[in-house]
Image (cartoon, grey):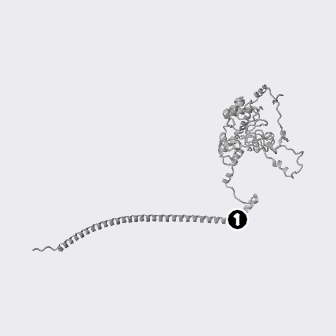
Amino acid sequence: MSKSPDTKSIMIPAVGGAALVLGVAYGLATTNYGKDRIETLEASFAAERAAVSEQAARVTDLEAALAELQASSETQLSEAQAAAESQIATLSAQLEAVKAAAGAAAENLPAVTAAAASTQARTGGFGLGREAHPEELAAWDVDVLPDGRGLPVGSGDVWTGDEVFSEKCASCHGDFAEGRDAWPVLAGGFDTLDDRDPVKTVGSYWPYLSTVWDYVHRSMPFGNAGTLTDDEVYAITAYILYSNNLVEDDFTLSNENFTEVEMYNTDGFIVDDRPAVEYTMWSGEPCMENCKDGPVEITRRSTEVGVTPADDGSMAESFMEEQLARLGGTEWGKERVAGSVFMGPGGVMQDEPVEAEESAGTEVASADGAAPAAEADAASDAGPDPQLVAMGENVFRKCSSCHQVGDGARNRSGPQLNGVVGRAVGGLDGFRYSGAFETAHDEGMVWNDETLAGFLEDPRGYLEGTKMSFRGLNDPAEVEAIIAYLKSFDG
């Protein structure tokens, strides 16, 4: 009988084989994992080596830049040090030169002091200061003499002067050089120097054109002196000459033709002989009593030159009257203002104003108080409409800066206009008209409703060449009114 196999003997080899298989499998797995881990670490090490290499390159670049900057700084520092040393050497040399000059001056001080004492004794000076440099003298030497010395090169025409004058001078002297308020008149006044109240203007009084140019150049415009260019001064001077009828409207003034202009009053002055004739009268003891033969009398009043108000009606349109009326006063000659004095004929003081006598032509109401209709119609035909006249009086304010009308009217920069309606153009005796008016006069032109209307609407267009720079009246009603107002003064 056969013997059965031992179970334990069979199982042990089987378990051992399985363990061997499992060991081999584990070993293989472990080997693969190690390889993957090594590859990962190698990749990481490669990235870190690349980063380190990049940082090393940057460090190299920074070290190169730093080295370059250090080299440049050393160069600049060397150059600055060299420049500073050069400047120090230059200043040291200058200092030594100044010391040497000071020493030489100290050695010559007695001689210089003696020269200064000699100068003081000779001229009365104190030996102070120094001679002015030519440039300093030139800055002050701006005066212009009658013979043209001192004039700068330049020129200016009348119409440019008109524009500049309107912009920079008219606020004080008026658009037509007629003067405003207390500012001086620059045009007109011819043949008035022997009057009781002469009108002294550039045209009527000033003997030399150089005085005009020099004064405008130095002192004008008021409050902003010295801002005019040379050409503007020439142009303004030309316009002032034109306003005084001394040149034509196409005139250009320049340094070349300056001395050719003849002033109206060139021969109106004499050599001042007062040192020889009058000064001796003042060298003795002054008279303190009974110095005048005969009684003391008032020979002239300040009202005559527009300084003090007058109550004779002559200042009814003045700026002073307007201001006093604004402060509570009334028109001069119509009602007394507190503290004022009424002036009668000849400048005699009166307690009450002189009432104007009724004219012989004044109509007197009939006994029953009603004037005949025929007389009323005749009076209406004989004179202009009173309402139109009143309107014209207001419009005439635009003209009053140059023209006067009514009792006591005088020529100003324009002629007085009493009796102008019906008068020949340019026909008022004693007034210097421009060439345009003289031509119109020679042609027989007469002032009537038609000619006055045309001239008032457009003076320069109607009478070419007129020096009247008024632009004209745009409103036909104003033209009609001012003609009616002028008709009320028959001269």
265 over 451 or under it: above or below: below
Residue 27 screen position, x and y as percent: 26, 69
Q: In this view, does 57 lie to the left or right of 198?
A: left
Quarter of the rendering occupied by the N terminus:
bottom left
Q: Can you identify the residue that label 1 sits on?
A: 109
- Residue reaching furthest to the left: 1
Amino acid carrying label 1: it is Leu
* Label 1: element kind: helix
- Relative horizontal placement of residue 93, taking residue 129 as reference (left or right): left
Q: At x 89% / y 45%, what residue is drawn?
A: 295
Residue 321 figure quarter: top right
Looking at the rendered image, the quarter that the C terminus falls into is: top right
Can you give x and y, in whole percent of width and height, for residue 170 in the image?
Answer: 69, 43
Q: Where is residue 288 in the image (x, y as percent from the top left)?
A: 88, 51
The answer to whether 475 is drawn above or below residue 12 in the figure is above
Q: Toward the viewer: 402 or 108?
A: 402
- Residue 255 seen by the camera: no
Furthest toward the top, the residue is 374
Q: Residue at x 62, y 64 (%)?
A: 97
Left or right: residue 177 versus residue 362 is left
